[in-house]
Amino acid sequence: MSVTPATPVTPARGLSGLREFWYYFSQNTGAVIGLVIFVLLVLIAVFSPWIAPHDPAKIYNGFFLVPPAWQEGGDGRFIFGTDAIGRDILSRLMHGARYSLLIGAVVVAISLTGGIILGLLAGYFRGWVDTLIMRLMDIILAFPSLLLALVMVTVLGPGLFNAMLAIAIVLQPHFARLTRAAVIAENSREYVTSAKVAGASHIRLMLVTILPNCLGPLIVQATLSFSSAILDAAALGFLGLGAQPPTPEWGTMLADAREFILRAWWVITIPGLAILVTVLAINLIGDGLRDALDPKLKRS
């Protein structure tokens, strides 16, 4: 039985697909706004050592809890004010963006890789392999995500790396279940059957034939998990189990400022707003990606 080879994607077709993707993505105004905000955050994070007005760890004696520049008693040198020990909040926010975005990227990379491997194995081989993997994922999902991450970090010890590892394990079942469902749906299609008849190995079938056609929903889930990872890391940092002082991570900044919430609103409100804006922007991007990648949601 002869098998018709897959038609290669020409540059023109690839460009057309990119234009189609951008068309549907740009129809979502919120997604475009979120993308602009996220790009700005990435630029701030990358260039923070050069554009931050002060060293994030430098202590300015005599400038403790200075209010923002626009408020009475503020100082123009400290636009967002200073914290309880005289460090510039704006500079710490800029450098903290690097940690928050790094946490999101590392967590998504770990959980996505592990989830894809487990989901591919479960959806492709089915049987006892599927049962074993899915029951393990069900056990993880049975616990509240933040509580499970909290317990794991407590066992592993406080620290940024342990926090990222715990959050990645907690988020992994979502990718595994999504990959499994997509693999099961794709495994019964004609192009997979043709590849099997042509003698393709299991590894080639899973990684080359099936997986590329399952990436759409995984990209959307990765975007949403990115924001969840930032939130969970901030929560662990607030509890003292994530990044440790003097690291300018946003959750740690909140933890350091909680005792001054009534007398110095800016030390806790401004880092909280940074987390809110970042998570909202990423969620808006995820919504736009869903519209652009899901054929059922594309408007004619």
Image (cartoon, rainbow, N blue to C red):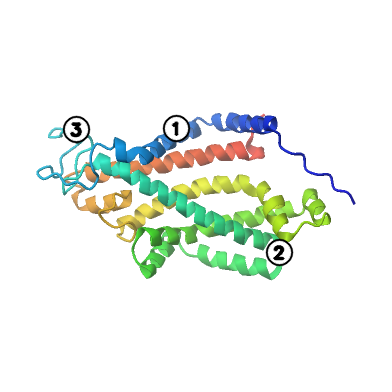
* 276 displayed left or right of 254: right
Kind of residue at badge 3: Ala
Q: Secondary structure at mark 2?
A: helix
The reply, left or right, for residue 53 in relation to residue 44 is: left
* Residue extending furthest toward the front: 50
Crowding around mark 2 (Cα neighbors within 10 Å: few <14, some 14 to 19, many 20+) is few
Label 3: how many Cα within 10 Å (few below 14, some 14–19, many 20+): some
Q: Position of residue 125 (x, y in %)?
A: 71, 64
**Cα distance in 3D space between marks 2 and 1:** 42 Å
Where in the figure is residue 118, as x and y percent of width and height?
61, 61
Q: Is residue 72 shown left or right of residue 296? A: left
Q: Which residue is mark 3?
A: 69
Q: Residues within 10 Å of mark 1 (few under 14, many from 20)?
A: some
Check whether the beta carbons of the residues at disc 3 and disc 1 lie within 8 A of each other. no
The mark nearer the N terminus, 2 or 1, is: 1
In terms of image quadrants, where is residue 56? top left
Residue 190, horizontal then vertical, whole percent: 80, 49
* Amino acid of disc 1: Val
Residue pointed to by mark 1: 36
Image-based side of 163 in relation to 293, left or right: left
Q: Position of residue 230 (x, y in %)?
A: 41, 50
Q: Which mark is residue 179?
A: none
Task: Judge whether 74 appears above or below 122 on screen.
Answer: above
- Which residue is painted at 62% across and 29% down in the image? 19
Name the residue tied to disc 2.
Answer: 125
Q: Quadrant of residue 123?
A: bottom right
Q: Is residue 164 above or below residue 217?
A: below
Residue plotted at (38% across, 54% down): 233
Could you tell me the amino acid type at mark 2? Phe
Circle 1 SS class: helix
What is the distance, in whole Å, between disc 3 and disc 2 at their CAs?
Answer: 62 Å
